[in-house]
């Protein structure tokens, strides 16, 4: 029964929840492997110069993977490919997939070759504050990592095909193998090499992991899209549409990824360990974004792209899907933001406090997480809005607003990270908090623009104030309980045990309060869990 004044959720779109669950489950496994990788990394590297060098170097292949994978393919390829499948034009869909795969292979090969040649300039661009041995190590690592970029981009192409066929789980669990390869390398060689030597071994392990990640997806891709042939023939209308949309999306995603580079560039001027501290915090605050924001957005994009009918019918369907997706995202992201703000030290210590990573390092990461919590919700909701634009074959509007966000975040980041701390007498290392804070503030402006423009096109979609108030109120009350437990029971407990003792009651309290307030997402989730438990008994 719904509490008085609490709006009920809109009808869930067919398949939306199940597909989002599959994406979320795949991402969860991948992220767990990633967190284990980061914990092992923290054990052997702490927040050292070698750790800074590896994290800075790793941003280059990660940049290209995110650019081509989540960005270009999600916005330009998946909408066209899914639409062709929905209309039964499977031969044309295969032709488009073959052309896109060939173009990706050609472009990334050229980028890899060029990247290896100009590596010193790239390192100076992404980490101008690095000098001496730290800079030399970063150069060596980039040259090792670059060839694996091509494999990761082709893996993203596989993901695009698998997602369009609604085979989400394999595509999002494949990166587990990549993390496993790196974890194994650190465990085997961690005690035998110094930090610099271990960083080199880890880079080679990343290449091996990329081979495994691609290899596990290829057989299923060939089975689902049999008859794929490499081709550069742009005679297909679908292929031309993908290429035409490629430019704006490439620039748009490039702008977004550049924002991450700007953060690292600014962090490289801060005290030693700042780049690694930022990377550790990014691992944490991108976790809920991936689990809930990406899960919903990735599952909704092919579904939205497959909608057919008159303009008004398409708009009505998109509103229903968007409304349900926004509610699902907010239900999980709101407690994540409050958790980072109030209990970030507990979270960071549980995941990273081992070996060379101290409690003071965990507190440092907590400060960075607190800055990110300001824009966590709007940044995640913005992903679903962007997917809706892509489903409408509009790639330019998200580009304009992303460019504005990055410009604002860069300007604010320079002020808050570099200029403000000395003026206020703050330890320069805390300037890194200003980077995530500035990104969150700029994210609010981008979200407002995306929302306003889309509502003009398909009609208004807005979560009721009462719904958001229920979520925020429940999260704050749960955080108060978790904070009380931390203060009274924290002394003498190991970081992992403390996390269980604090975060367990926090999560239970949030679900209990939202259930009592009649939040439909909470009641549906709890009902499913209890039903499964009953069946197993």
Image (tube, grey):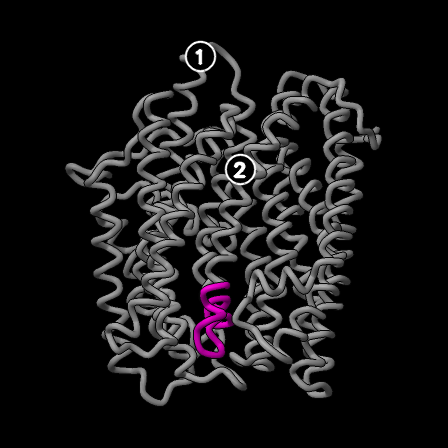
Please provide percent x and percent y for residue 533: 46, 54
Q: CA distance from mark 1 to mark 2?
A: 22 Å
Which of marks 2 and 1 precedes in the sequence? Answer: 2
Q: Is residue 340 visible?
A: no
Please provide percent x and percent y for residue 189: 73, 81
| Disc 1 packing (10 Å; few <14; some 14–19; many ≥20) | few
Residue at image x 67%, y 75%? 137
Q: Secondary structure at mark 2?
A: helix
Q: Are marks 1 and 2 in contact (CB under 8 Å)?
A: no
Characterize the magenta stretch by its predominant secondary structure: helix
Q: Is residue 193 left or right of residue 402?
A: right
Q: Secondary structure at mark 1?
A: helix
Q: Nearer the viewer, mark 1 or mark 2?
A: 1
Q: Is residue 270 magenta?
A: yes
Front position in the image: 243 or 490: 243
* Residue range of the region highlighted in magenta in the rendering: 265-280
Q: Is residue 18 left or right of residue 404?
A: right
């Amino acid at each position: 029964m719904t509490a008085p004044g609490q709006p009920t959720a809109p009808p869930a779109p067919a398949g939306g929840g199940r597909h989002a669950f599959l994406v979320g489950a795949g991402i969860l496994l991948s992220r767990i492997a990633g967190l284990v990788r980061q914990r092992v990394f923290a054990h052997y590297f702490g927040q050292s110069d070698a750790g800074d060098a590896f994290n800075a170097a790793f941003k280059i292949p990660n940049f290209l993977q995110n650019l081509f994978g989540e960005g270009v393919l999600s916005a330009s390829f998946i909408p066209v490919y899914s639409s062709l499948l929905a209309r039964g034009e499977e031969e044309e869909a295969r032709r488009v997939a073959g052309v896109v795969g060939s173009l990706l292979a050609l472009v990334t090969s050229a980028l890899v070759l060029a990247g290896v040649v100009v590596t010193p300039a790239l390192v100076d661009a992404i980490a101008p504050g690095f000098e001496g041995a730290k800079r030399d190590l970063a150069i060596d690592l980039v040259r090792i990592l670059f060839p694996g970029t091509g494999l990761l981009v082709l893996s993203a192409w596989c993901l695009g095909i698998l997602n369009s066929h609604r085979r989400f789980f394999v595509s999002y669990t494949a990166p587990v193998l990549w993390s496993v390869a790196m974890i194994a390398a650190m465990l085997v060689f961690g005690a035998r090499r110094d930090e610099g030597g271990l960083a080199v071994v880890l880079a080679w392990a990343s290449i091996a992991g990329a081979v495994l990640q691609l290899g596990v997806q290829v057989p299923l891709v060939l089975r689902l899209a049999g008859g794929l042939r490499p081709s550069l023939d742009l005679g297909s209308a679908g292929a031309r549409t993908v290429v035409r949309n490629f430019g704006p999306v490439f620039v748009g995603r490039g702008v977004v990824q550049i924002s991450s580079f700007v953060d690292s560039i600014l962090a490289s001027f801060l005290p030693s360990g700042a780049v690694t501290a930022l990377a550790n915090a990014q691992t944490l605050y991108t976790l809920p974004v991936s689990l809930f924001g990406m899960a919903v957005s990735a599952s909704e994009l092919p579904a939205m792209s497959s909608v057919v009918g008159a303009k008004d019918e398409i708009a009505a369907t998109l509103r229903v899907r968007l409304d349900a997706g926004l509610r699902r995202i907010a239900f999980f992201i709101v407690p994540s933001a409050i958790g980072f703000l109030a209990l970030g030290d507990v979270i960071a210590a549980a995941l990273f406090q081992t070996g060379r990573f101290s409690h003071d390092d965990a507190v440092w990461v907590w400060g960075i997480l607190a800055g990110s919590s300001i824009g966590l919700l709007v940044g995640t909701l913005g992903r679903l809005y962007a997917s809706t634009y892509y489903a409408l074959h509009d790639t330019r509007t998200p580009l304009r607003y992303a460019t504005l966000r990055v410009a604002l975040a860069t300007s604010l980041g320079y002020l808050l990270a570099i200029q403000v701390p000395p003026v206020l007498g703050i330890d320069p290392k805390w300037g890194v908090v200003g980077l995530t804070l500035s990104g969150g503030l700029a994210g609010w402006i981008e979200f407002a623009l995306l929302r306003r423009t889309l509502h003009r096109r398909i009609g208004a979609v807005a979560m009721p104030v009462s719904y958001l108030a229920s979520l925020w109120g429940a999260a704050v009350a749960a955080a108060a309980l978790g904070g009380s437990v931390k203060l009274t029971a924290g002394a003498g407990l190991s970081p992992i045990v403390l996390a269980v003792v604090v975060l367990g009651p926090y999560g239970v309290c949030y679900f209990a309060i939202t259930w009592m307030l009649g939040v439909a997402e909470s009641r549906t989730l709890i009902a499913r869990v209890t039903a499964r438990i009953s069946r197993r008994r």
